[in-house]
Amino acid sequence: MSQTKETIGQYQEINSLQGVSLFSATDYKIYYDKSQKAKKRIKELIGGQNRLYFKVDSTEANKIQLDREFKSALRAEYKNRFGFDSGFFQLARMMQNSKSVVGNRHNSGKKLTKVINSDPLLGPDVVLMYSQIKNEFTTPESYLIISIDPYDFVTMGVGQGWATCYKPLGEHYSGSFSVGLDNYTFLTYIVTKNPDTQEYIKVPLKKIYRRLGVFSKEYDGVVLSTQYPYKNNGFEEFTLNTLEGLFFNDGPEVERKHSSDIKVYKTRMSQIYNDFTLAPSNKKENLYLGYKKEKEILSYGTAMNCISCHKGLASSYLPICTQCEDDLLEDADWGMFK
């Protein structure tokens, strides 16, 4: 099977993330083509592309993200300049008790820098650090990406500063491959740099607010998982408005609701972790968006065979079967698995 520059680059990046080669470039190309075939209907809905992106125009969403990034920069620079001392935790508490860190607004009504300056553990040196970082800090541009790219599914467990059980060699790594082979699942996520200016395979590795969307059998509704690793209400509203305009703009009344009557279950024997029923209560979203309906059961994930031999069922943590895993252990120096 002939490879393409795109799939070879993706395969090489996946190997780098795994730290070990689990399957061949040809195996990945076969998986890629199967995924594209499975997502044919969704691909039509997003204009024949693997990724469709929109510049976020929500002021609230960008402010929330800006504050998160500014807090992270402050913590990192404090640790770099002063170390991991009691002042570090004092600054963290102050940021937690501030309406807007980048806006210099403490919950007490005072300027955050005044509160910092008066604290014996912090003082003017930390105020100076705050000012220096703020002077160099720029508001990020945010972009919503809707994706059915096979590579984005494989890497859906990693992002900017976070990882889940779907990460390479994670507890449910195979689930990311599994969900890339069903007919109904897509991804949405946010990046803070224009995708057109980034290397294609690096874009999803910088994602934030990743979530899964699962279509109904008639593609007339979708259930969304929660944003990961945390929630941004501004991005939430922008995402819902965008999905509604893209998928449900020419039919009957559209509704948004949290309903226990519209359920999502994993396909039997699939390797996907059931984000919609097994996730911690604070991570469950189950938000329905689509044309009005009372009850429906949606399914996602696929019982995926080994990506290498294509015979036995893949395990939950590797996209290969136990026999291929045993063969690799015998033939290669897998120090990490010894």
Image (cartoon, helix red, strand yellow):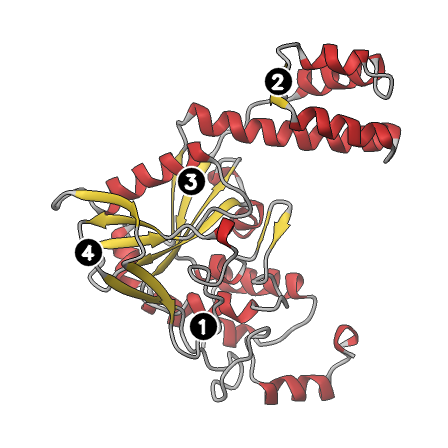
Q: Could you tell me how far apart the alpha carbons at marks 3 and 1 are, in whole angstroms? A: 26 Å
Depth check: give the residue in front, 51 or 105. 105
Residue 234 position (above or below residue 265): above
As drawn, the label of residue 31 is 1
How crowded pointer 4 is (Cα within 10 Å; few <14, some 14-19, many 20+) is rated as: few
Point out the tag, 4 or 3, that comes first from the N-terminus: 3
Residue at the spot x=70%, y=66% of the render? 19
Q: Amino acid at mark 1?
A: Tyr
Point out the tag, 1 or 2, that comes first from the N-terminus: 1
How crowded pointer 1 is (Cα within 10 Å; few <14, some 14-19, many 20+) is rated as: some
Where disc 3 sits, the SS reads strand
How crowded pointer 2 is (Cα within 10 Å; few <14, some 14-19, many 20+) is rated as: some
Q: Amino acid at mark 2?
A: Asn
Q: Which residue is mark 3?
A: 144
How crowded pointer 3 is (Cα within 10 Å; few <14, some 14-19, many 20+) is rated as: many
Residue 291 position (above or below residue 313): above
Q: Could you tell me how far apart the alpha carbons at marks 4 and 2 are, in whole angstroms? A: 44 Å
Point out the tag, 3 or 1, that comes first from the N-terminus: 1
Question: Which numbered disc, 4 or 3, marks the residue closer to the eye?
Answer: 4
Where disc 2 sits, the SS reads loop
Where disc 1 sits, the SS reads helix
Point out the tag, 3 or 2, that comes first from the N-terminus: 2
Q: Is residue 103 left or right of residue 129?
A: left
Q: Could you tell me how far apart the alpha carbons at marks 1 and 2 are, in whole angstroms? A: 52 Å
Q: Could you tell me how far apart the alpha carbons at marks 4 and 3 are, in whole angstroms? A: 29 Å
Question: Which numbered disc, 4 or 1, marks the residue closer to the eye?
Answer: 4
Q: Amino acid at mark 4?
A: Glu
